[in-house]
Amino acid sequence: MNLALRDIRHNLGRFLLTCLGLGLLLGVALAMVGIYGGIVEEALSLARGMRADLWVVEGGSRGPFAEASRIPGDVREAVARLPGVVAAGSLTFQTVEARHAGGPGEATAPSEDNVRERAGEAGRQRIGAVLRLQVVGYEPDRPGGPPGILAGRGIARGRLEMVADRSAGLPLGAMVEMANLRYRVVGISTRAVSTGGDPLAWITLRDSQDLQFRLSPPAARRAQQGGGGALPQDTVNAVVARLSPHADAAAVAAEVRRWKHFAALTGAEQENVLTRSVVDKARKQIGLFTTVLLLVSAVIVALIIYTLTMDKMREIATLKLIGAPDRSIVALVMQQALLLGAVSFTSGTALLLAVKDHFPRRVVLGLAEVSGFGMLVFVICLLASLLGVRYALRIEPAQALGG
Amino acid sequence: MSALVELAGIAKGFGAGEARVQALLDINLSVAAGEVVGLRGPSGSGKSTLLNLVACILEPDAGTLRLAGETVWQGRWSRADLRALRREKIGFIFQFHNLLPFLDATDNVALAMTLNRVPLAEARRRARALLDHLQVGKRASAMPAKLSGGEAQRVAIARALANNPRIILADEPTAALDSERAQVVMELLRQVAREQQAAVIVVTHDDKIFSRFDRLVSLRDGRIEAD
């Protein structure tokens, strides 16, 4: 006769409500685990999506994600000539607040902020959603382009064309306005976002350099007034290279480091920079918050089990008096704690899996994360039940006697 | 008739030094098989302590306690040994029946048997027979909250009898009942004592049932005042 199950069945409503509350809490904790994984995966997706074996950046920096990096665009030629390099491409990166300016259907970007405003000089009315994009300028047919095209096509050297990440919510053919120029979305890429969670958008290197210049006209004007002439436009943030399978990335990187004013990172080093430096604080913050949530969950489970045990003080005393062994009492308390954890974990996980795709940033929950978290909940419930078990074992059989 | 409960020179105190309270002193009492003994006395007279001693919940400071032929506390008695003794030889009846609220009447009785390693199906069969015998068989599937006070006390008596105990300890079993139901419960206890040749000890304040005991033992200040 399973006393734990019979007691739960007797107070089913209360038990389910308790499980629902705890399930929500565990769901939040699991969401934090997923967000933690999402931050790391998004950070890595940026570097991995480029499929670059080597990153050449400004000397003394760990750019272009961790630090600012500006190098001449023609460095690409020098990199391409290095032994072991199969292909090299120049890249620019800039965060832009773009605007969906019409096109097939209306975009429903997750980060949209619908606005209606008058555009200054042109005086024309612009209607659309503000889109925060990480714009990547690249050279078509060279390394650094979109990791994969889900719909449409890549950029075929056409000006004012764009391939946007699917998380931007832009449909094919949509027009995106940046610095008073309109770009047509010709392709949708597989998911790739910046370390800040902004969707990536690829345009040609020339367009991106033009965009960079248009976005900072005051700097250009000041340079001209100072007699320095126009700012050089063939500036890029990094040059990426793909190496032959037999090439040693570390050796090629060492070769580049011998050049004056340049630094080089292998693909693995870039991933390390992204996860250990760029998103490190966010990772730690989320990790700490997850730990706090798990501790709170443990305390709550312990209190629930303790209260449930206290409520059964007379029943436990009666069981002891009529000769029930300690193991029956321990089983009653522990089974209830584990059932509470199991039902709460299941409901919390189901709820989270149902809504995780609606989160603004990616929530990565694989079998490993869910089963690992489940094991953790199991251990928490087991440890938390010890408080109830201790209380139950201290109940004296004499407490069953008397009023 | 042989004595099933024998207390010889039993003493029990609580606390230490000046705060020490002598709850029982030089208690000599024996209850024979088939005998129903009432235990009465004012609050603080030592009734509950005496009941706890016979129930093997408390260990006496001095004296000898023999239950159904076994001398308790002499030699090594673990908590598990004491529980086994209670499970096999003692049946308990409480003031407020103390039925487990999450088990129906049958399973409340069957539980006591399963603790004694009786298979559940067999325990349930015997429990239903016992409930029938105590004329509460029609309520076998009812949860304790749905039972009347009298019905609940009959189920509690059935639970106390589940393992055919030689000793039955009842703590104010009629306190929560009206006098008619109290008489019925007392008649049941007398019947059990007679049929099972059990020794029945009833702690009570209820003067309406004093006449139903074979012997009435009065306690005052930890001593037997009258027997």
Image (spheres, rainbow, N blue to C red):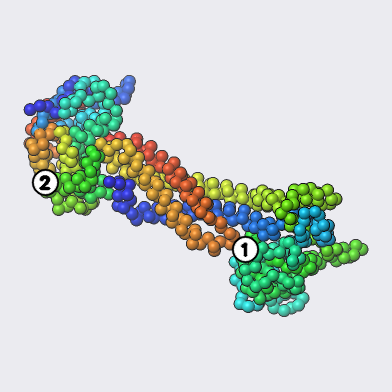
Instruction: Specify whether A79 is left or right of B206.
Output: right
Answer with left or right where residue A264 lies relative to residue A32.
Answer: right
Q: Residue at x 59, y 56 (%)?
A: A38
The residue carrying mark 2 is: B133
Answer with left or right where residue A43 lies relative to residue A258: left
Closer to the camera, B141 or B113?
B113
Which image quarter: residue B169? top left
State how many labels appear.
Answer: 2
Name the residue located 83 percent from the left edge and 65 percent from the top edge: A233
Along the viewing direction, whichever of A155 and B98 lies nearer the viewer: A155
Residue at mark 1:
A191
Q: Quadrant of residue B117?
A: top left
Q: Nearer the viewer, mark 1 or mark 2?
A: 1
Image location of residue A59, percent across then percent down: 81, 51
Q: In this rendering, does residue B49 appear at all?
A: no
Disc 2 residue type? His
In percent of width and height, residue A231 lies at: 85, 63
- In what quadrant of the picture does the C terminus of chain A appear? top left
